[in-house]
Image: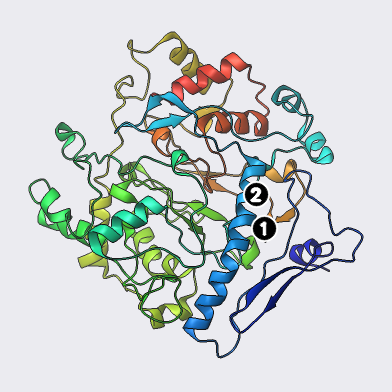
Amino acid sequence: MKTPRQRSTRWICTVGMVGTVGGLLGLMACSHSEASRINASEQTPEIPPPSTPPPPPGETFEQMKARLEAEKPFYMDRQRALLEARYDLSNRPGRVKMTRGKPIQAGVRVKLPPGQTWPQLAVMTPAEIRAADVFPAGFMPLPHPKQLEGGMLFPHFAIEEILAQTGRDLQRFDLEFDLPDHVLPEFPPAIFLTTRLDLGDVSHGEVVTTHNYYRLFKDILNTKQLDGLRLLVSPFAQQQFNLIDDRRSAEPQLGVACLDCHTNGHTNGATHLVGDIRPQEQRNRIETTSLRGVNIQERFGSQRALMSVEDFTQFEQSAAYFDGDIDKAALKGVNPLDPISQVQHMAEMQKLFDFPPAPKLDVFGRLTSRATAAELRGEALFRGKARCAECHSGPYFTDNSMHDLQLERFFPERVVNDQVANGDGPIKTFTLRGIKESPPYLHDGRLITLDDTIEFFNLVLELKLTQQEKADLLAFLLVL
């Protein structure tokens, strides 16, 4: 029986590789009658990658670097074509802004299959959508730009700031981050502390690193919390960023820090692959989730369901940093955290990161008299017809559980840019407090705006919301 990846390559052309550095020769002619087959949902041809791991035997670091640099345009062009086929990525900000002033992108950005409209899709059953293959491609899993390797990828603005402050260069020579700046969280994000709400944003507009954490926090944290923050901004070896030849940075690097992705205890949108799924093409992309509100959460990881932030902290250092390949971790310099003197300190600090203020919510997460008529209608929908509160319940809008949306009802399994696209399985219910500041959405960042997210759940949960109801629901989400 053929694997999904084998099935996907029956109709695709091959890419030739020549030269000692593996330079791209280009696409070769393909004699198969289905060589030009195009996935109707993607509108981009499925093309095999120019090379796959493992590397050629005896390859030096310089040869490997040159080979991967030569392949980089292929992967980035292929990913760019995928994104352009799925989304409208233009910069169209709305009137609502994040805490420090970055506008939130407005409008539905997922592109529809030819001839379809949202109202037409909304009246179709999942079986009908699957049979007609008209489930929007932007609602399907989003692959990593280089699915067969994966690894951490940072937005350029984070790379530049960390380099300027610390001298560490988190630029990969083989890949670049794929989503534009305007669809990502603001940078740097604000910092709110559960212990000092009176201070408001304590970031002072700075990205917290090893070089400024003490100056910024020495007067508002105790010594244990300060040590936890020190560890959260300290770089440790990682699969793609380390001191040996098996790395993806031009120069050896000490590694990455927790807050390199979770900037200021929030997120900068950095991405990688979950470490606990195999084979490689089955692994899910994961967008960095915010650490705001960790103190009220009971599950950690989109699918792993780790039961404490202490467990998750240890897991990240020992496994996620190395894509689950513990055989490579010791050679690259894994940092085995001590549960008492390190994990506890880090966890205590993480639990101080608070949500941004929501002045229209009361202590139970309900709207007050300051709310507009549209926001009140949206709240009623949230707790009623839209069924959001069945999972996103309570004052923090999470049931601390996991749910399976069973997306396989809507489309047959397929391979897209080397990733097997299928149902996601059980996913953690993330909190919706402060949700407007955490784009893009869903665990892999496949939904660009909150408008996209509303259309996604309207279709997947068969809600049949009207256009006015969608607008009202959005109004409520923007005040959380």
- Counting labels gives 2
Q: Amino acid at mark 1?
A: Asn
Q: Quadrant of residue 117?
A: top right
Who is closer to the viewer here, 285 or 315? 285
Q: Position of residue 31 (x, y in %)?
A: 90, 66
Q: Residues within 10 Å of mark 2 (few under 14, many from 20)?
A: many
Image height of 447 relative to 58, above or below: above
**Left or right: residue 100 compared with residue 472:** left
- The quadrant where residue 295 appears: top left
N-term mark: 2 or 1: 2
Q: Which mark is residue 417?
A: 1
Q: Quadrant of residue 335?
A: bottom left
Question: Height in image: 129 above or below 372?
Answer: below
**How would you rate the neighbour count of disc 1 (Cα within 10 Å): few for under 14, some for 14-19, many for 20 or more?**
many
* Residue at image coords 53%, 82%: 63
Percent x, y for residue 415? Answer: 72, 57
Task: Locate residue 242, reporting x and y percent.
Answer: 37, 74
Q: Please, what is the three-letter code of the amino acid marked with disc 2? A: Leu
Q: Which mark identifies residue 82? A: 2
Front residue of 64/39: it is 64
Rendered location of residue 175, percent (x, y): 51, 62
Which quadrant of the rendered structure holds the C terminus? top left
Front one among 270 and 465 = 270
